[in-house]
Image: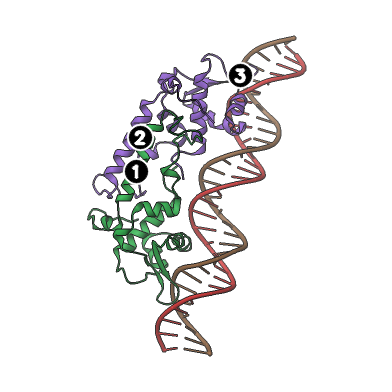
Chain colours: A green, B purple, C brown, D red
Amino acid sequence: MALLSKSCLYGLRTAIFVAQQNHNAFIPISDIAKELDIPADFLTKILQRLTKKNIMNSLRGVKGGVRLGKSPDKISMYDIVQAIDGETIFKKCFLNLEGCGEEAPCPFHESWKDFRTNLGNMLKDTSLTFLIENKKFTRLK
Amino acid sequence: MALLSKSCLYGLRTAIFVAQQNHNAFIPISDIAKELDIPADFLTKILQRLTKKNIMNSLRGVKGGVRLGKSPDKISMYDIVQAIDGETIFKKCFLNLEGCGEEAPCPFHESWKDFRTNLGNMLKDTSLTFLIENKKFTRLK
DNA sequence: AGAATAAAAGACTCTTTTATCCGAAATTAA
DNA sequence: TTAATTTCGGATAAAAGAGTCTTTTATTCT
């Protein structure tokens, strides 16, 4: 098990990669796929979810491809995770117990609640701009 | 996506349930399955992983079933997660980047390292005894 | 207008996880 | 020793996630 799905990881890596390129030009998905070692057709599907949420922007045809849908400092990792994997990670009980909540918490409720809130905040606070400015962050595959 | 697999959640809930019962008696897996609303044959398989690690103890035949393999204060949630889902949750990079580590961290490395270490410690510190003594913790399904 | 290119859309396959089924082995009770 | 019970072990099936393929649609260039 992993916290994020493979689709989501592909999406995150792609968003970071695209943010590193010229922001005006459209980059063909096949180029990204080759660069990041991701199945191209699969990546196409994943990116559609990001374009629907205006995180990405796409264009068909000869000079087509994808680019960021808005300024990279307006896109957080949270946005991307939410668009692809949804928000359940940030909301569900650790033990997946339906009844667990403030009124009738499981013993993990408090700690886990803080944990996932912190995680969410961390992702919200991390923009693509921050990621690409961080010199240490080179590997994307 | 969830942090833990369904198998693991089944295992955790079962361990807590069994800890709540008389520790000497064997409880038939079918009884547990009915009580916790888990497919019995599937649960049987999952529990085999716990018996192999001596977290549980099983007996075939008429008075058979499963019981804890040791004192409930000697069994932590970490033990159970490790037995079923392994330790990758506690070890992998948030972005699943192979290269990420102390020498060449991704920007999430530090925060995520702390997160997962905290999570691991929290699970290590939470014994079945603690769980069943916590009066608030009633729901197991 | 026509050819080439690239994403969108949908059907299909492959793999992993989850779930079911069945015969065998172990244990108890009569 | 036989019948009943219950886990074990392996095979199979169903569901979900990941990945592939083909056709359609939009766009550019000649």
Label placed on residue A119: 1
Q: Nearer the viewer, mark 2 or mark 3?
A: 2
Question: Is B26 drawn above or below residue A101 in the view shown?
Answer: above
Residue lying at 59% horizontally and 26% vertically, measured from the top left: B35
User: From where the camera sits, is residue B109 visible?
Assistant: yes
Residue B4 in the image, given as x and y percentages of width and height: 45, 38
Residue B102 in the image, given as x and y percentages of width and height: 25, 44
Question: Is A124 drawn above or below residue A100 in the view shown?
Answer: below
Are there few (<14), some (14-19), or many (20+) residues within 10 Å of tag 2? some
As rendered, which of B60 and A115 lies closer to the eye? A115
D18 relative to A31 in the view: left or right: right
Residue lying at 41% horizontally and 73% vertically, measured from the top left: A64
Which amino acid lies under the numbered mark 3 shown in the image of this protein?
A: Gly
The answer for which chain carries disc 3 is B
Label placed on residue B64: 3
- Disc 1 is placed on an element classified as helix
Disc 2 with disc 3 on a shared chain: yes
Label placed on residue B27: none
As rendered, which of A92 and A14 lies closer to the eye? A92
Q: CA distance from mark 2 to mark 3?
A: 35 Å
Q: Nearer the viewer, mark 2 or mark 1?
A: 1
User: From where the camera sits, is residue B51 visible?
Assistant: no
- Disc 3 is placed on an element classified as loop
Q: CA distance from mark 1 to mark 3?
A: 44 Å
The answer for which chain carries disc 1 is A
- Give the quarter of the figure containing the C terminus of chain B: top right
Label placed on residue B119: 2
Which amino acid lies under the numbered mark 1 shown in the image of this protein?
A: Leu
- Disc 2 is placed on an element classified as helix
Which amino acid lies under the numbered mark 2 shown in the image of this protein?
A: Leu
